[in-house]
Image (spheres, grey):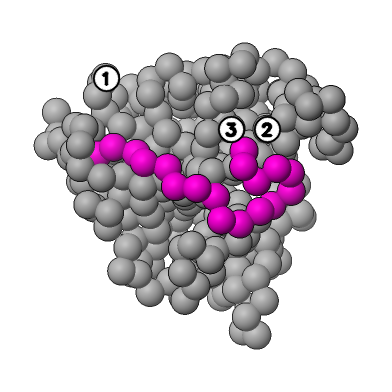
Amino acid sequence: MRKAVHTNVIRSGETLVVHGPHKQLPHSGRMKKDDRYDRKERRDVHGCIHELQQLLRLADYAPGDQVIFLGDLVAKGPDSPSVVQLAREIGAKTVRGNHDYEVIRFWEARRRGDHAIVSPEHAAIAAKLSTADVRFLGDAPWFIEAADMKHLFVHAGFIPRVKLTQQNPRLMMNMRSVLKDGTVTAKSVVGYEWAKLWQGPHTVVFGHDACRGLQHFQYARGIDTGCVYGGRLTALLLPENRLISVAAKRAYVSPRKLRTVLCDQ
């Protein structure tokens, strides 16, 4: 077993709003030294339950290890409900991804008797989740801070030179590039990685950018390796700072769709 790190999560109140009632959307999670954990960060799982189970075995996961998901546990892949259930049952933590957000937005609207316009896929996933699983996703913060290890975990990214408390939640779930004029975009534009501009002091670990695959900058690491597109599911093991991965069983979404929709190359 690797040397343990003391951590606990404390959630702060939300300060920024993206669609829907802001009191139901936490802003950040903060970890401090209280309970014993080793940490394993996993990129966007997208319902790939078979690959997730393989990765847990490869990581030599044991009860007491802290797993932190980088969002988008759901959508695109074969079994979103099983992924969420597994994450909850092992006591994992997750940040909020854009697909998770759509599922929660639909579920919360239905609970209030309101109407939310989401894709049929997100609506179908919401209908299959248990109340406990919905609560698990709904409690997910925009980012998690592990101050003792000087790491931040977020789904998509942060705007460089903007305080964490002033980051835009929608961008934390969707951004991929910052252009020369400061425009933030969800496109993976060659040479304009937001992570290249991040100046620390905390190292950011993020997912969401399967076009670029693994990214390694001085203060940022992207570990989305496109499992749902037939690539790999990757984890970063801390404090060793070691990457491991497993191959996708198959492509659940056409890689051509990934290039057409997201990659400006």
Q: Position of residue 177 (x, y in %)?
A: 60, 68
Placement of the C terminus among the 4 image quadrants: bottom right
Residue 21 shown in magenta: yes
Assign a secondary structure to mark 2. helix
Q: Position of residue 232 (x, y in %)?
A: 49, 39
Q: What residue type is labelled 3?
A: Gly
User: For mark 2, what is the residue?
Assistant: 104
Which of the two residues, 202 or 253, is positioned nearer the viewer here? 202
Q: Is residue 263 visible?
A: yes
Q: Is residue 33 on the magenta stretch?
A: no
Which comes before the other along the chain, label 2 or label 1? 1
Instruction: Report whether 53 appears left or right of 111.
Output: left
In the depicted structure, whether residue 198 falls above or below residue 95: below
Q: Name the residue under label 1.
A: 63
Extent of the magenta region: 7-24
Identified at 62% across, 80% down, the residue is 182
Mark 2 or 1, which is nearer the eye?
Answer: 2
Query: Which residue is the site of mark 3?
Result: 138
Whichever of callouts 3 and 2 sits on the residue coming sooner in the sequence is 2
What is the quadrant of the N terminus in the image? top left
Residue 251, visible in the rendered structure: no
Does dot 1 land on a helix, a strand or a loop?
loop
Residue 89 point in image, percent of width and height:
43, 17
Q: Earlier in the sequence, mark 1 or mark 3?
A: 1
Label 3, label 2: how far apart the Cα atoms are: 6 Å
Kindly identify the amino acid type of the residue bearing the numbered disc 1: Pro
Tell me what residue is drawn at x 55 percent, y 50 percent.
Answer: 14
Tell me whether circle 3 and circle 2 mark residues in contact (CB < 8 Å).
Answer: yes
Find the residue positioned furthest to the bottom: 181
Q: Which amino acid does label 2 sit on?
A: Ile
